[in-house]
Image (tube, coloured by chain):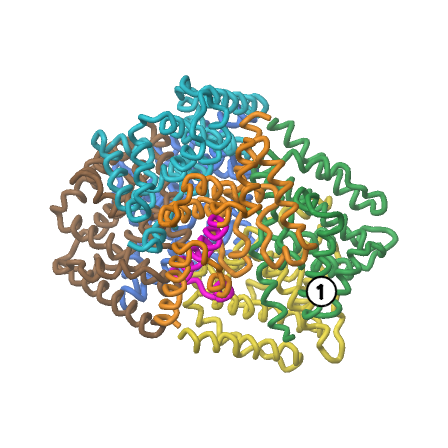
Chain colours: A yellow, B blue, C brown, D cyan, E orange, F green
Amino acid sequence: MSALAALLPLLALDRLPRTGWLLAGVRAPESVAAHSLGTALVVLALAPRVRPALDVEHAVALAVVHDVPEALLTDLPKRAAELLPPGAKAAAEARAAELLLAPLAPEALALFRELGARETREARFVTLCDKLQLGLRWLGYLREGARGLDEFRPGLAALECAEFAPCAALRDELLAAADALGERAP
Amino acid sequence: MSALAALLPLLALDRLPRTGWLLAGVRAPESVAAHSLGTALVVLALAPRVRPALDVEHAVALAVVHDVPEALLTDLPKRAAELLPPGAKAAAEARAAELLLAPLAPEALALFRELGARETREARFVTLCDKLQLGLRWLGYLREGARGLDEFRPGLAALECAEFAPCAALRDELLAAADALGERAP
Amino acid sequence: MSALAALLPLLALDRLPRTGWLLAGVRAPESVAAHSLGTALVVLALAPRVRPALDVEHAVALAVVHDVPEALLTDLPKRAAELLPPGAKAAAEARAAELLLAPLAPEALALFRELGARETREARFVTLCDKLQLGLRWLGYLREGARGLDEFRPGLAALECAEFAPCAALRDELLAAADALGERAP
Amino acid sequence: MSALAALLPLLALDRLPRTGWLLAGVRAPESVAAHSLGTALVVLALAPRVRPALDVEHAVALAVVHDVPEALLTDLPKRAAELLPPGAKAAAEARAAELLLAPLAPEALALFRELGARETREARFVTLCDKLQLGLRWLGYLREGARGLDEFRPGLAALECAEFAPCAALRDELLAAADALGERAP
Amino acid sequence: MSALAALLPLLALDRLPRTGWLLAGVRAPESVAAHSLGTALVVLALAPRVRPALDVEHAVALAVVHDVPEALLTDLPKRAAELLPPGAKAAAEARAAELLLAPLAPEALALFRELGARETREARFVTLCDKLQLGLRWLGYLREGARGLDEFRPGLAALECAEFAPCAALRDELLAAADALGERAP
Amino acid sequence: MSALAALLPLLALDRLPRTGWLLAGVRAPESVAAHSLGTALVVLALAPRVRPALDVEHAVALAVVHDVPEALLTDLPKRAAELLPPGAKAAAEARAAELLLAPLAPEALALFRELGARETREARFVTLCDKLQLGLRWLGYLREGARGLDEFRPGLAALECAEFAPCAALRDELLAAADALGERAP
C-alpha cells in the first residue's frame, strides 16, 4: 500500500473526541490526536528524569502510535469496554493496529505491539504517561471552570507509579493542584 | 432509582457524535440524539402509509429508545463492531440497555428488547427507518457540499425494503436525488 | 408531496440551537432536535408512573412533534415572543405546523394540534415534560460548571404540576439537586 | 442604567447565529455580530464611492446598530417573519431597540429609528449594504465549497440599487463571481 | 481594485479567534469580528457621555477598522509580540493595514492611521474602549462559569482612564462586578 | 520548574487552530496539536523507507517538538511572517522554544534547535514531513468538499524533495490525487 493510502485514514484522529470527557459533560473536548501528542509531551518531560535512564526517543515513538487504532475503533470508553467480553477490546485494538499500522510501516506496528506487551520499561512508562496526560487534561479542565469531573480523581490517585519516580511526582502534583482549586472554589 | 438519576446520563446523547460521519470526514456531524429524533420523524412520515396499518405511535416509541444504550457505549462504527467477537456488540448493547432503561421505565426496556428481537412488524419497520435516516442525512450532507461520502451509497441501495413499500419508495427517492446531485456537480 | 420533500426541511432541527441557552451565555448549547428527543425521554420516564394510567406511546409521539415548527420559525425565546402581538407566536406555530407536518403525515399534524389544545391529559402532561426537560438540561449545565443561569430557577419552581404527581416529584428533585450544587459551590 | 448593564446583553450578538444560513445547511455560520461588522465594512468600502457624497461615518454608525435588537429577539428568518401578522416583526424590533438601545445611549436609539424610517439617503444606503453583506457571505460560502444555497441568488439579483451606483456594481460583481464558480464546478 | 476583491479577505475576521482567550483556556472564544463590533458598541455607549463632546460617529468608525489588519496578521497575543523586535508588531500592522484598507477605501486607511498616532481625542478614546471591551468580555466569561482568567484583571485595573471619565466609570464597574462574583463563588 | 508547570501551557496546542486553513476559509480546521501528531505520523510512514537509513525515532521526536513554540506565539501564517523584519519570526520561535522547552527537558530544547539548524539529515527530513502533512490535510479537506484552497498547490508542487525519495513519492501521490479530484468535480 502506498504511504498516502496508509496516512489518509489517520486524519480522522483529529476529529475523534476523547469520549470519556464527552460522557462527563465536557463539550468540544480534546481529540484523540491532541491526546496522543499530549502523551508524547508528557513522555518528553518525564523520561529524561527517570533513573536508570530510559530510551527517551523510543518512548516518544511509543506514545505517538499508542492510540492510532482508534482511527478505526473510535475511543471506546472504559465503561463500554467493561460490557464487552474480557479481552475483546484489546483484541480489536490489536487487529485495528494491524490494519492501520502494517501498511504505514512495520516499525510502527512493532511499536504498538511492544506497548501492549508491557515487557519493556519504556512500554510500562508510556502506559503511565497515557494516564498522566488524562490527569493533566483533567486539571486543565478544572482550571477553566469545568465541574462534575470528580470521577477522574480516584483513577489518578490509584495510579501505581512505583517503578518511575518522576511519574509519581507528577501524579502527586496533579492531585495537589486539583485539590487546591477545590479548596479555593469549593 | 429516581427519575432524575435515570435521566441524567441520557443528556450525553446530545454530545455524542455519530461516528460514521466523523470517520468519513464530516466535521461537527449530527449527534446521536438528533439521529434518534430524526428516525422518529422518518417513522412518523412513513408508518401511516404502510398497509396493512402499523401501530404508528408504538413505532415512534421504538425509534425514540433505539440508540439510548449509546449513552454508555458511544456510537461504535460498523467497521469497529466487525473487529469484536460475533455478537459482542449486540450483547453489550443489551447490557447497556438494561443499565440505562430499566431505571428509566420497564416499558422503555421492553421497547428496546422488542426492537432487538425483530419479531414484530413495527420492530422490523423501525430498523429500516434507522437506516433510512442515515440515507436522509447522507443526502443532506451531499446537498450542503460534503464530498467523500460514496461509501454510504451501497448500503442504502442494498436496503431490503420488500416488507414495507413506503420504505422502498423513500430509499429510491434518496438514491435518485443523490445521483441527480452527482450529475449536476460530478 | 413525497416523504423526502417533507423530511428534508426537518434536518435543520439538528442545527438550530435552543436560543434561551444562547442568550444566557451557554455556548454550543443543545439543539432543538436534542431537546425534542430529551422531552420524549422525560415522557418515557414519567408517563408510566402516572395514575390513572396515561397512553404512554401517544405521549411520546406528542413529544416528538412538539417543536417541529421551529424548523421554519427557529426557537423564538420567551422574551422575544412577549414583544409580538398576543397570540402571534402561537398562530405562527400553527401555520408552520401545517406547512411542515401536513405533508409529513396528517397524523403528525393532528398530534401537534392536540398538544396546542391542551384538552387531553397526554397533551397537558407533555407540556409539563417540555418544561421539565428545560429543568433537566439546566441542572446538567450547572453540574458541568456553567454559571449565570439563575433566571431559569423561578420558572421551574413555579411549574404547576398538581395534575401529575411524577412531574411534581421530578421538579422537586431538580430544584433540590441544583440547590445542593449551589451550596457546595455557591 | 449604567453602561455596564446596557452592554452586557449585547455580548449575546457574538453567540447568535444568522439563522438563514443555518436553515440552508451551513453549519457554524457567521454570528449576528460578525454580520453587523461585515455590514459596516461594506459601508466603509462603498460609501466613499457614492455621488453625491454620503456622510460615511454616519452610515457606519447606522450599520453598527442595525441588528442590535436581535440580542433580544434573535435573528428571525424571513420565512418565519412572513408567518407573523403584517408589521409584527418590525414592531417587535422597534420595542427591542428601545429596551436595548435607550439605556446604551439615546444617540444609538436615534440611529436605529433613522434606519427604520428609510428617509435619509444614509439609511437607504445601509439597508442595501445589509443585503450586500448577505451576498458577500453567500459568495464566500460558495467559494469554500458550500452547496445548496441557490435560494439566495434571486434576492441578490433583484436588489434595487438604482439610487447608489457602487451598490449596483458590487451586486453585479457578486453575481458574476458566483456564476463563474458555478461554471467551473457546476 | 474592485470593492469585492477588497472585501473578500475581510470575511476571515469572523473565523479568527481572539487568541488571548484561547491561550487562557476559553474554548470557542469570540472572533476578531465580534470583538470589533463589541468595541464599536462600547464606543456608542460611552462616547456620548464624554465631556467635552467627542465626535461619536467618528469614534465608531475608528473602532470598526481598528483590528482589520488581523485579517492578514491574525491576532498576535501580547506575549508573542514581546518576543518580536521592538516596534515590529506595529510596523507589520501598518503594512497590513495598507494592503487591506487602501483598496477598501482611502478613508478607511486614514482612520487606521489616525488611531495608531493617538493624537486625536477620539483615537485615544477608542484605544481605551478596545481594552474595555476586553474587560467586558472577561466579565461575561466569568459570569458564564469560566475560571483561570485572573491574568486579565491587572491589565484592566491599571487602565489609565483619566482623560475620559466614562471610561474610568466602566472600568470600575467591571472590576467591582468581577470581584463580587469572586466573593459569591470564590 | 516542576514538570506540571512546564506541561500546563502546552495544553493550548489543542485549542490553537492552524491559521493558514482559517484564512483560506476552512472553518474549525485542525489544531496545532493535531498537525504535530500528523507530522509525526508522516515521519513514521516515510522514515523507514529512506535510504541510507535514518534514525526513525529521533525523527519522530523532532516532529513532536517542532511546533511547541506556538503555544506561546500562536501559528503565525506565512504572509504575516513576511510583514515582520527578516528573521524576526525565527528569532521569536527560538526564544519561545527556550521559554517553553527548557523547563520541560533540556533534551526537548536540543531537539528544537537541531531542527532549526537543518544540519542533520533527520532535521531536513522532518522539515519536509511538516510540509507534506500540510499537503495531506489539503487533500483531506478537498476530499471532504472544501474548495477555494488552490493557493496550497504550488507550495506543495515546488517542495524540493531530492534528498529523500519517499518524500518525493508522497508529494507526487498527493498532487495526483488532488488533480484527479479536480477532474472528477472540476
Name which residue lies at 52% across and 37% down. Answer: E11
Q: Give, as a three-letter code, the residue at label 1.
A: Glu
Q: Is residue C6 left or right of residue B149?
A: left
**Residue B27 is covered by the magenta coloring:** no
**Residue indicated by mark 1:** F98
Left or right: residue F25 versus residue C183 is: right
Measuring from the top left, give residue D156's x and y in whole percent: 43, 24
Secondary element at tag 1: helix
- Asked whether the viewer can see residue B93, the reply is yes
E98 lies above or below F58: above
In x, y percent, where is residue E37?
44, 44
Please provide the residue range marked out in magenta. Answer: E125-153
Find residue F74 and report its horizontal and vertical position in percent. 62, 54
Q: Quadrant of the N terminus of chain A?
A: top right
Q: Check the residue under mark 1 and report the chain it is in.
A: F
Q: Farthest residue in the top direction?
A: D162
